[in-house]
Image (spheres, coloured by chain):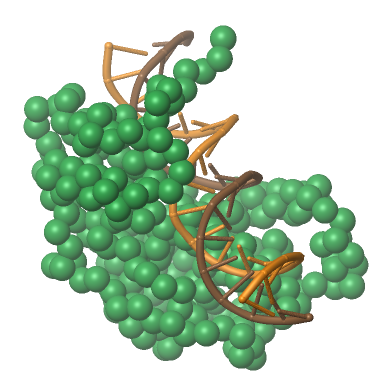
Chain colours: A green, B orange, C brown
Amino acid sequence: MGRQPCCDKVGLKKGPWTTEEDKKLIDFILTNGQCCWRAVPKLAGLLRCGKSCRLRWTNYLRPDLKRGLLSESEEKLVIELHSRLGNKWSKIASHLPGRTDNEIKNHWNTHIKKKLRKMGIDPITHRPISSTDEHHHQTGQQQQQEQVGVVAGEDKRSENIILQCSQSQEEEKSVSVSSSFDFIETDTFLQKSPGFCTDEVPMIQPHEIIVPCASTASYSSTSLPSSCLSSSPSVKAEEIQFPCMEWPDPMYFYGMDDFSQWDPIPNNGDGELAFDPLNQLYQRTAGDQESWN
DNA sequence: AACTCAATCAACCGCTCTCAA
DNA sequence: TTTGAGAGCGGTTGATTGAGT
């Protein structure tokens, strides 16, 4: 017995969204907030499935989205996070305010991968490409999947805390830098490379966002199952918050305007970079992992 | 100007996860 | 404990755009 489709696809529209549809969806969500996505198209008068509506909203229509290419610092952060988390795009996106997992995934596949390879870095393992590795790159998907497996394995071994993210309540709150990954070399390559462009996009400030609804945390992990219009008469106070309120505090600390003083790549020597939840900033910890526990 | 090819990115698909009944 | 609905995630596709010839 097969799984039921997420929605009745008969008569539903697919493909690119029209401005009319966008308007309907925006109007509905701004008026009613995000509720059960399954119910959204019906209530909003759209011939789309709920999944499509959710995707359109989270990836394109949300008012807190940043536009334009990722900045150099954002790219660095993506590389750093990818080296630790692998293809966990939603988790990576949760560290980049205003960016979606889809956007980051696309940017990774179209830009960053190439840049890293150009710089002699394997985008899967984040290690310098040896001549043999180069050969492996050309051997196809199987090899790639195996390498992804390696990264995933590293992720699961993330007991050694380096970077601790305050807002995350998931396993990556303690993500690690495995000693097997040579981030220093990666950083060096990045610094030497003229390839990264800076395209800073003005960040929408929290007070500029008018969304009377909760967001999905990082547009990914938290939904509002209990606050559906049709299923719950009351909405919990903590669920009514602006999307940006769930952005990582470190981003506010850095203001997202100037990453120039920030080295997203932990060094290999005396100190390691860790997020201090009390002071809301990253600190070199001299490897004192116990203090965070 | 016309054509081809590559790059980009919005959107879809199918699977997994979560949670309530 | 089981089951099913809904939401989320990651991989992939395909339409569009731009560069090169």
Side of A66 relative to C17 (left or right) = left
Side of A167 relative to A195 (left or right) = left
Quadrant, the N terminus of chain A: top right
**Nearer-the-camera pick, A130 or A212:** A212
Name which residue lies at 80% across and 72% down: A129
Name which residue lies at 58% across and 64% down: A108
- Count of numbered labels shown in the rendering: 0
**Image quarter for residue A253?**
bottom left
Taking A152 as reference, is A187 above or below it? below
Quadrant, the C terminus of chain A: bottom left
Q: Position of residue A147 (x, y in %)?
A: 75, 54
**Nearer-the-camera pick, A76 or A38:** A38
Q: Is residue A285 visible?
A: no
Name which residue lies at 43% across and 48% down: A16
Taking A61 as reference, is A52 above or below it? above
**Image quarter for residue A277?**
bottom left
Name which residue lies at 52% across and 74% down: A75
Q: Position of residue A88 (x, y in %)?
A: 53, 52
Taking A30 as reference, is A228 above or below it? above
Side of A275 relative to A235 (left or right) = right
Q: Position of residue A103 (x, y in %)?
A: 47, 60
